[in-house]
Structure formats: structure tokens, C-alpha cells
Image (spheres, rainbow, N blue to C red):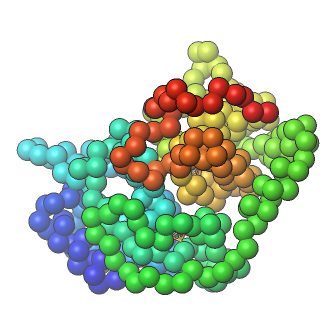
Amino acid sequence: MDELRNYARELLEKEEVAAVIGYQQVTEKRTKPIVITDPAETSRLVFNEYCLNNLAVYLTKARIRSLMRTKDKTMKLAIVAKPCDVHSIVALIQENQIHRNDVHIISFNCHGVVKDFGCDFNGDNLAAKCIKCETHKPLYFDKIFGEEKQTPKAGDASLEKINELEKLNSKERFEFFKSEFDKCIKCYACRAVCPLCYCQRCITDKAIPRWIESSSHQRGNFSWNIVRAFHLSGRCTGCGECDRACPMDIPLSLINRRMAMEVKDLFSFVSGRSLETPTLVGNFDKKDSDEIFM
Ligand code: SF4
Ligand code: SF4
Ligand code: SF4
């Protein structure tokens, strides 16, 4: 932990970064995000299996970005990012929301996080994304800490559920998702935690014309959740934050993960993996299939 704290302190003292976005411990099994601008405060930084938040969401927030601009220069933001969170940062860079030179990525060799605060770290309580993790080492970083360690073994319940839903016909699948989306209270927590939901004005907030009922009413629930899934197709990096944030336990990752599988099969594209390739929707390839799958 000292290595992380000393490194962050030096970055701030040398004015190489304007702020460090990281985690601080709240209780033994809970952390929360912290934005540090004072070098003395870096002693609060931690990194462990309870660092659940995907901090990349803060990189597009106006209040955080305003820290970058001083009277005479623009400074970088340093961010503590798990390897999977680095995928979100890559996607944001690809979508021109932040420049690579404006972000200093401090990452870790990662063996997983718990599915929720308060849990013990073991195979029964592993976050779903860690079960299918392919990048325990970050693909891009400016500094890396931590030793490589084994991730606890766990079954992939999310994939089992996707396979189960695949066996249903389209009407039955529709009914499954409709009953799930019916539970939505339109709190927009899924949108707030998603690094890729950065639109300054979401389609659901538009009143003229009103595309989607935005109040806490079942009307428009299906549209809201399907539109969001569409907007995240080929962009969602599978960080699982929307799933974790949803107070109604709607399994949003089922639809996001299934869409990501479709994108990988059809276009050999996985979001947030390469700074050398364009985004999926920002690239037209004449070889792309024109077929519409039902
Ligand atoms: S998905 Fe991979 S990188 Fe992300 S927290 Fe889990 S083990 Fe770490
Ligand atoms: S849609 Fe959910 S899983 Fe995908 S990037 Fe956004 S918060 Fe993460
Ligand atoms: S977090 Fe859940 S309840 Fe809230 S808007 Fe999203 S899907 Fe609906």
C-alpha cells in the first residue's frame, strides 16, 4: 500500500497530475471513491478486493475535469484502475472523451474483487466479471503494482443463465426481460455508474419530443432498458457496475453480456481492448454483415 501512496504523493508534489482518483477504506470490507489533490491526503489510498467501483466514470465528470485546468497549464488526472476498468478508459479514449495524454493510469495485477461490500473474498463471493476475466494484467498503464495471484475458482452462473435463455423462443425471452424490466423504478443508477453513459443529456431526459417516459412509472420501462442496451452495444466493457448499482436487482449484465457476445461473433470486436483500432460503431467495413438476426 505504501508504494501506491508514495507514488501518488510524488505525482501530486511534482505537479505531474492535478488529482488522484482512487479508493479509501470505509470499513474492513468496504471502500469508497476519493479524489485527492493534497499530497498529504494520499495516505488514505488503498487497493484491495473491496475496490469495487469503476472509477473511470469520474473521468468525464465536469467537476473532476475542472481540476485539470490551472491558471497557466492543463494537468493530467491520475486514476487507480483495475485492469477491467482500464478497458473503460480505453473505450473513453477511443470515443474521444478523454485524451490518453491527459490520464495517468495506476493499475495492479488483479486477482479479483468481491461481488458486494461486506462479503469475504472467496469463490462463492467473487464478482461475476472476475469469473470470466481474461485480463488480470492491465493492457495499458503508466504504473503497475501488485503481485500476480490466483483468482478463486467459481462457476459462471451468468453464462449458464444466458444459455438457458437461448433455449427459449423469442416470445418467451421477451416475456422474461419484460418481467425483469417491469421492476425498474427509473432511478437511473445504472446510467450514473456507467463510464460509457456520459451523454450530457440522455434520451430519456428529453421532453420535446418525449421519447421515453422518464418518471418512476412502468410506462416506458421496456423502452428505457432496451434503448440503453442498444446504446451500450459494442461499447459496454462488462464492468458490471450497472448490475451492482441496480436497487431492483434487474440482471442487466445478462442483456449487456449477450449483446457483447453477439458483437464479438459478428464483428470480432471487444470493447475497450485496443487504442490502435477505431470503435465498432465509428468504423464502416464493407465486409460487415447486412443481415438482421431475430
Ligand atoms: S474482472 Fe479481472 S481485472 Fe477486473 S476486478 Fe475481476 S479479476 Fe480484476
Ligand atoms: S453497461 Fe454496465 S457493465 Fe457495461 S460498461 Fe456500463 S456499467 Fe459497465
Ligand atoms: S438501476 Fe435498475 S431500477 Fe434503476 S433505472 Fe437502472 S434498471 Fe431501472
**Where 127 falls versus 222 (above or below)?**
below
Quarter of the figure with the N terminus: bottom left
Q: Residue at x 54, y 66 (%)?
A: 134
Task: Answer yes or no: is residue 137 visible.
Answer: yes
Locate residue 83: give its quadrant: bottom left
Position of residue 123 in the picture relative to residue 9 (left or right): right
**Where 107 falls versus 285 (above or below)?**
below
Residue 30 at x, y percent in the picture: 53, 75
Residue 140 at x, y percent in the picture: 35, 60
Residue closest to the far front: 287
26 or 56: nearer the viewer:
56
Position of residue 46 in the picture relative to residue 230 (left or right): left
Residue 209 at x, y percent in the picture: 61, 15
**Where 274 falls versus 6 (above or below)?**
above
Quarter of the figure with the C terminus: top right
Task: Answer yes or no: is residue 116 visible.
Answer: no
Position of residue 274 in the picture relative to residue 181 (left or right): left
